[in-house]
Image: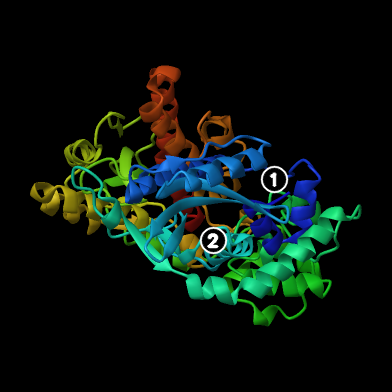
Amino acid sequence: MLSKSKFILGQQCVKSFWLDINNIEPSNPPDDGAKERLRAGNEVGDISKQLFSGGEEVPYLSGQEKEMFEITKKLIDEGATSIYEASFIYDDIFVRVDLMNKTDKGWDIYEVKSSSSKKSYHEYDASIQWYVLKKLNIFDLNEVFIVTLNSKFSKKKKISPINFFNIHPVTEIADINKLEVEDKINELKEISKSPEEPILKIGSHCKKPHACVYLDKCWPTNMNEINSVFKLYKLPLKKKLKLYDEGIDTFEKITNIDSFSSIQQLQLEAYKLNAPVINKDKIATFINKIKYPISYFDFETFTDAVPIFEKQKPYMQMPFQYSIHIQRNKDEELGISDNHFQFIADHDKDPRRSIAEDMIKNFPKEGSIMAYNESFEKRRIESLAEYCPDLSDELLALNERFIDLIEPFRGGGFYHPKFKGSFSIKDVLPAICPNNQELDYKALDISNGGMAMSAYKELRNNPKNTDIETTRKNLFKYCRLDTYAMYAIYKKLLGFVNI
């Protein structure tokens, strides 16, 4: 049976569709981020039911699509005016409609998304449902809508669903898509019968709109190697694929080097030399901007699709943790625990005021504040200042002191071949400071920001099932390494200039 989700998968990639329906084990299974998005979708779905409160819900019965269809028809026959997860089958196509509401002109159907904007693939989600219901023709239809989050919504006590969502009419689009949907259905049915895996070139469809769980089955085995064209810094995927299709899969095969950006040329040169390329003048220009004491600073944040705190918006980055290492002068050597300040907010409370007050208390009154990709930290401070207007002047004054450690790398001051086209601190650190166990993210139980967010939210969502003290210790270790890593990298930059 062809479900709505499989239709959308098949529309993105028929090969992925075939692998999925044949129960082939994914080579790139969903990560923590995908699980977080699923949870967000469930939370948004629950809130959306309040748009038409008092409705009847069709339970999900695994493998019992016909039974769900019968339950839906019974609810309609018995006079239900709002139905959640209404289920329908037509010509072996199964769809579940998030919301249905009866009007004087017929039933309106709603496809609910946890996104803050309407995407083109959302329109096809709605279109296949509209197609099935039109073909069934068992009741009058009025309109079809896509429901997305209102990114400007700010929580005040209770959430008002009508203000929390944006509702987009897409009936005209669904009608226009009818023939395309029908053709795709027929194509997918034929593919599902085939014993042969479809042949399809790799392309942008492998990553958009969703990351493919079979990526490694199709993409070249050397795509993550240091000399792969897929690792060229900020080269658009379309251009990478063009090179690959022309047989240029490695740096050695590139001949027109002048057509690449200055950083890409540095990357190619560093690979050819098998050594870092250093521009001491650019590094010195960066270093000369810095004033001691240096406060190496980093936030960890969480987001909620459905806000739970006052003045919180959907997917608003909420700082819950910070780390600061303070280096008083150029000659001061820091151990990982030296001159270190850290804070994690109570997971049961709004973290913003407590983290803002603690930051102000621990920052030196002068000197540079160093972050890696400073815009993220500065925007979080701006949001804290908006939330805590009485602390606004002190918080915004911090933003005037920021300096961005990514600058000498992104600006061409230093390129190491092991960066692999990325200036992420996770890639820069091991290249510049190799074989240092104290600086090894992989040795940590929490080793990236996504894991940190999930761990903190787990404290809030399932405190009884979580070792709170151990989780907090792991969070402290991770954020502490982020700021100590900046100190270690900056120390290396100083050494390069002094060679």
Residue 194 in view, yes or no: yes
Q: SS for tag 1?
A: loop
Provide residue 493's location: percent of width, then percent of height. 47, 53
Does residue 367 lie above or below 126 as drawn? above
Q: Quadrant of residue 175?
A: bottom right
Q: Is residue 364 left or right of residue 68?
A: left
Query: Between marks 2 and 1, how big is the CA–CA gap?
Result: 33 Å
- Residue type, mark 1 in image: Asn
Q: Is residue 83 left or right of residue 221?
A: left
Residue toward you, 380 or 418: 380
Q: SS for tag 2?
A: strand
Q: Which residue is mark 1?
A: 28
Q: Quadrant of residue 406?
A: bottom left
- Residue type, mark 2 in image: Phe
For label 2, the crowd category at 10 Å Cα-Cα, with few meaning under 14, some 14 to 19 and many 20 or more, is many
Report the residue at 45% width, 36% height from top: 454
Report the residue at 24% width, 53% height from top: 154
Report the residue at 61% width, 55% height from top: 419
Residue toward you, 172 or 320: 172
Provide residue 100's location: percent of width, then percent of height. 45, 53
Residue 336 in view, yes or no: no
Q: Which residue is mark 2?
A: 414
Quick one: label 2 or label 1, which is nearer the N terminus?
Answer: 1
Does residue 368 lie above or below 304 as drawn? below
Does residue 28 lie above or below 436 as drawn? below
Number of numbered discs present?
A: 2
Report the residue that reaches farthest toward the right.
195
Q: Which mark is residue 218?
A: none
**Color scheme of the displayed model:** rainbow
